[in-house]
Amino acid sequence: MPAAWVFATNNKHKLDEVRHAAGSLITLQSLAQLGCTEILPETGHTLEENARQKAEFVFAKYGVPCFADDSGLEVEALNGEPGVASAHYAGPQRSSTDNINLLLSRLKNEANRKARFRCIIAVASHQGLQLFEGVLNGNIAIQPQGTMGFGYDPVFVPEGETRTLAEITLEEKNKISHRARAVRKLISFLRGQIQ
Ligand code: IMP
């Protein structure tokens, strides 16, 4: 009988990705399946704090082992911005187009285009708290290219690539993405817990 875990998200893409990676190791519930309808705390100043807040809230309230993720884009020439503010960089409308336009305007005439996507997965269980990190290094393009993906994908060119993340298939992205890298670490942790 696989162990029951909650993934503190209702994002179907993220749930599918982790379910696929975990196979029959665990059964995974979303927040909706758990019956959790409240807005989870996410008031931290770092990805680590936000992921931790969400996982610990669910574990404390429902007593089910839980993991939660938080991710963002960190641009070297902008001292790590937009970072934890990635989703609402250009304002509360959370528009990817506005966010990209603001980012490109802040990088106008900037030669250093180095950036990275970072994903943190926090695990809260009877074993305490664990954090797993996944990083994808790359560069910010001069202008958006491609129509696939979401968020900053049209302006992010992974290291060793000439295409943006919006020009590669989801299958290719899922092999190299910051989230996939953090998920792989999570799965090997869960394997160690369960076997
Ligand atoms: P979340 O924590 O995964 O919801 O990500 C927060 C924000 O970071 C998103 O709204 C996007 O703006 C940005 N982001 C995170 N992961 C990606 C990605 O894989 N591609 C593009 N943007 C991303």
Image: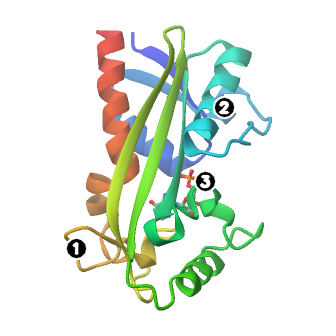
Color encoding of the figure? rainbow
Residue at the (57%, 82%) spot, across then down: 106
Is residue 147 positioned above or below 33 on the image?
A: below
Q: Which residue is tagged 3?
A: 84
Q: Is mark 2 within 8 Å of ligand 1?
A: no
Amino acid residing under circle 2 = Gln
Query: Which sits earlier in the primary sequence, circle 3 or circle 2?
Result: 2
User: Is 97 on the left-hand or right-hand side of 138?
Assistant: right
Q: Which residue is tagged 1?
A: 161
**SS at mark 3 in the image:** helix
Amino acid residing under circle 1 = Glu
Amino acid residing under circle 3 = Val
Where residue 162 appears, as percent x and y from the top left, is 24, 80
User: Is 162 on the left-hand or right-hand side of 67?
Assistant: left
User: Is 15 on the left-hand or right-hand side of 90?
Assistant: left
**SS at mark 2 in the image:** helix
Query: Residue 53, which numbered label?
Result: 2
Q: Are marks 2 and 1 in contact (CB under 8 Å)?
A: no
Residue at the (54%, 14%) spot, across then down: 125
Q: Quadrant of the C terminus?
A: top left
